[in-house]
Image: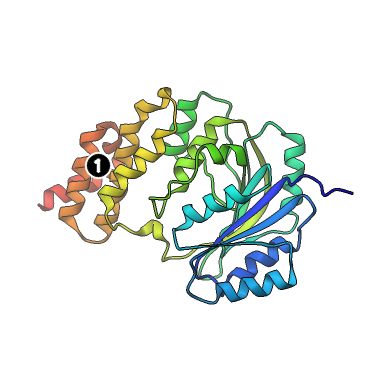
Amino acid sequence: MSRPETLISVIVPAYNYAHLLPRALDSVLAQLADDVELIVVNDGSTDQTSALLADYQGRYPAIRIIEQENGGAASARNHGIREANGRYALMLDADDELLPDALSCLRQMVAHHPEAGMLLGGYVSVYEDGRERQRMPTAVPAAPADQLIRQYLLEKRIAISHGCSMFRRDLLMQRPYPESLRNGEDIAVFAFLLISAPVALTTQPLVRIYKHSDSLRHSRTNGEAYVVEMVHHVFSSLPASCQPLKARYEAQRYLSLFRAALLAGEAEQARYFYKAAFKRAPVQALGWSYLRKALRLMMQA
């Protein structure tokens, strides 16, 4: 009897997480099936990740291990996607873990929504102090592309995260993760997926996502250059109807830098970032939560 077609490829990019990686791997292996494959991309780790993966592959020959030089999470995900066989890909971070029956739930969702390009589920946030909070997926309306992008990028009314989301692999091949970005690289991909095919939802929690205070998302290194590149990547794959939102999104990214500079006590940088946001999209910069802080800052000058 021939092996059934691979439906789901679980792809785990790993970089120096040998101490946490077993948790992620075991959570997938516990629900592995004939139509599921597990791919781990070792992104040039310098800790014990290679030895750990060799041990796992010796015990579980079905695991596919891909070794590459360090290129970042986007590069590792793209490599895994190219090598995968599944119709769908689920990206699981090396420090997170699938919940029991997550893959069974996703399999049923595909059966009921074969047209879906993205499947969203609930998840459990786990904080460093041990607190946990269950979060439900946000509704995705049947709406024109520009409305969906506005809700996702500007209004933050649509939330998408790895681990609790599964994507059609052919769409990921059309819009790879931008490898020049070392954080926030998923936003461009999520925006493209959102408008490319229907979205299916389940309220069942699919993954435990562990939150870390040292996340790269908090970094402001080369902040302005990052904003320009990020916005370019996000809008380069969006249709013409979405392009009028570009200036507002760029302003919003500058406002994020403004807020971070304020928190760091860097008044001059904060003023610069606010003015840059206002120049690009006054309507975005005049939101009261930002304007109030900016006025207080200007009076201190």
On the image, which quarter does residue 254 sit in?
top left
Query: Dot 1, crowdedness within 10 Å: few (<14), some or many (≥20)?
Result: some
Task: Tell me what residue is drawn at x 46 percent, y 32 percent.
Answer: 149
Examine the rendering and report whether any part of residue 298 can be seen.
yes
On the image, which quarter does residue 54 sit in?
bottom right
Q: Position of residue 256 (x, y in %)?
A: 32, 48
Q: Position of residue 150 (x, y in %)?
A: 43, 32
* Residue behind mark 1: 291
Residue placed furthest toward the right: 1
Q: Position of residue 104 (x, y in %)?
A: 77, 50
Examine the rendering and report whether any part of residue 289 can be seen.
no
Report the number of numbered marks: 1
Describe the element under mark 1 as helix, strand or loop: helix
Task: Tell me what residue is drawn at x 22 percent, y 44 percent.
Answer: 274
Task: Tell me what residue is drawn at x 67 percent, y 50 percent.
Answer: 9
Between 71 and 210, the one nearer to me in the picture: 71
Q: Is residue 182 left or right of residue 266?
A: right
Dot 1 amino acid type: Leu
- Vertical placement of residue 50 versus 289, above or below: below
Between 39 and 152, the one nearer to me in the picture: 39
Q: Is residue 56 left or right of residue 187?
A: right
Between 144 and 166, the one nearer to me in the picture: 166
